[in-house]
Image (cartoon, coloured by chain):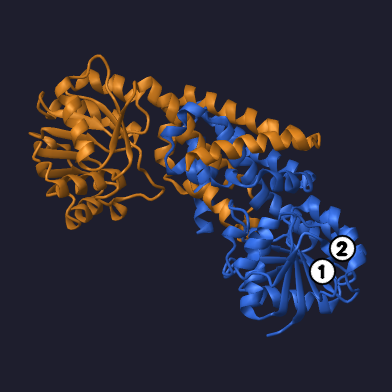
Chain colours: A orange, B blue
Amino acid sequence: MRLFKKAAIIGVGLIGGSLALAIKKSGLAEKVVGVSRHKKSIDLARKRGAIDEGSLSLDIVKDADLLVFAAPVSVILKLAPEVSRIIKKECVVTDVGSTKKEIVSRLEKIFPGFIGSHPMSGSEKRGVAHANGGLFKDSICILTPTGKTKKGSSSKISLMWKSVGAKNIYLSPDAHDKILSCVSHLPHIAAFSLINAVPDGFLRFASSGLKDTTRIAASEDELWVDIFLSNRKNLLNAIKAFEGALSSIESAIKTNNRTRLAQILKKAKEKREKLG
Amino acid sequence: MRLFKKAAIIGVGLIGGSLALAIKKSGLAEKVVGVSRHKKSIDLARKRGAIDEGSLSLDIVKDADLLVFAAPVSVILKLAPEVSRIIKKECVVTDVGSTKKEIVSRLEKIFPGFIGSHPMSGSEKRGVAHANGGLFKDSICILTPTGKTKKGSSSKISLMWKSVGAKNIYLSPDAHDKILSCVSHLPHIAAFSLINAVPDGFLRFASSGLKDTTRIAASEDELWVDIFLSNRKNLLNAIKAFEGALSSIESAIKTNNRTRLAQILKKAKEKREKLG
């Protein structure tokens, strides 16, 4: 179904490129254009059929009736004012940033058609080379409407995510950032810390346990600096909770408290089994 | 190649059952017998062709010329004295315990033919139902000989692991426990703590990041209580290092130090990429 005439994606990396591919595949837009800071990404995105046209300049987004910011949080915040001067007022605008409070409060002021999105289908891989039109299939996409969000924007963006295979969940930007600080940002903190705590010389003894636990530590560092710093308050709370949980185990080991240690691990096992 | 007449496995769970299956498959022993505390496990191990005979009683290990302890550390330590009164002096003995210092120092005193092993091919799954004769293929097995280890035992056990597909590495029990505290025990501590730090209500928002990072938190709690408590000193040091790494990230977030945070994450990313 053709929802848009011209879709513009700012940032044709893993997520932007995958969304572009999925939009092309589903026929949601007549034309898809992409912006990147890197000519190589534009060329590859065109070659892979993700975009019809690409440019290093934001001017290409003019006349778009769908605009998606698919860049790191700080880049979205930096580009937004300039983009707002180029696009049409009626343009439906969303982003795929991993934190929502800061982005939503800034972007809904300058884009009348804005609603925040967070497709939860990232990967430690990056770049359009790894883009995949099926990336959003059976994934969760969190939409973060506010009192200012227009119904038309909300229903179009919701339909877009559904059409590319995602299941939509609605949360306030605040709730989103609090939940994500625990289920996504904290696991990254744990993975980054864990790999940094293992002496280099021991790495060759790593088996699947360490590998799985630290897989996401190979994520793009710049992207995660942005995410962490744009969700500081929630994240510092989540880290405190993690330190508390770690310290209970540490103290049970230190005091040789078998019963207490067994209780803690059993609770963890039962909780983990719920995740499937 | 037939190395043994009668192989006895004490504990036919995931590891013991998989080793029994692999020994049967490779023809390393004429006969394989198994001991378990649970009749169901014995029946299933026989049905799956892992053992020729099984028993709830240790008496069945009499006359074995290969004995493998495949039980949690505390169970191995508890059963060893009784087993030593039953088996032949010439019997080659090993174990698959995840910590080595305590087991090796106790078992080499009572079994002349002892050498410690640690096949690094566990899983969060348990029980003979998940046993798999290919479990050790392309895995690492750490052998921990000491000054007391007989050459004959060492070469037979080394050949056994090679025959079932493992690559052997030799370490002292001390070095083993220190390395494993970092590459295996600490990741489990991190995973248990992480899942315990996530509020129950948020679990439905978990994506692959949290799932991978906490997969091993579904591991058998009793087994890991044993492992943690039998490697306390090393593990407490590893936890301290982890807390240090965590606290560097926390402090960079707290102080909004983008440069420092980027350095830490970049170091982690580069280290993780080495793991493949």
List x then y, in percent, for residue B58: 83, 62
Q: Residues within 10 Å of mark 2 (few under 14, many from 20)?
A: some
Name the chain under label 1.
B
Q: Which residue is at 12% across, 48% downward?
A: A53
Q: Is residue B79 left or right of residue B13?
A: right
- How many marks can you see? 2
Q: Between residue A193 and residue B169, name the one nearer to us.
A: B169
Q: Which residue is the site of mark 2?
A: B83
Rendered view: B137 above or below A223: below
Amino acid type, residue under disc 2 in the picture: Val
Whether the residues at callouts 2 and 1 have beta carbons within 8 Å, the answer is yes
Amino acid type, residue under disc 1 in the picture: Val
Earlier sequence position, callout 2 versus callout 1: 1
Rendered view: A270 above or below B164: above
Q: Between residue A276 and residue A197, name the one nearer to us.
A: A276
Q: Is residue A36 left or right of residue A269?
A: left
**Residue furthest to the bottom:** B1
Res. A269 image quadrant: top right
Q: Which residue is at 7% across, 34% downward?
A: A63
Q: Residues within 10 Å of mark 1 (few under 14, many from 20)?
A: many
List x then y, in percent, for residue B178: 74, 53
Q: Between residue A240 and residue A267, name the one nearer to us.
A: A267
Q: Is residue A25 left or right of residue A185?
A: left
> Is residue B145 something that shows in the picture?
no
Q: Which residue is the site of mark 1?
A: B61
Distance in Å between CA atoms under marks 2 and 1: 8 Å
Rendered view: A169 above or below A110: below
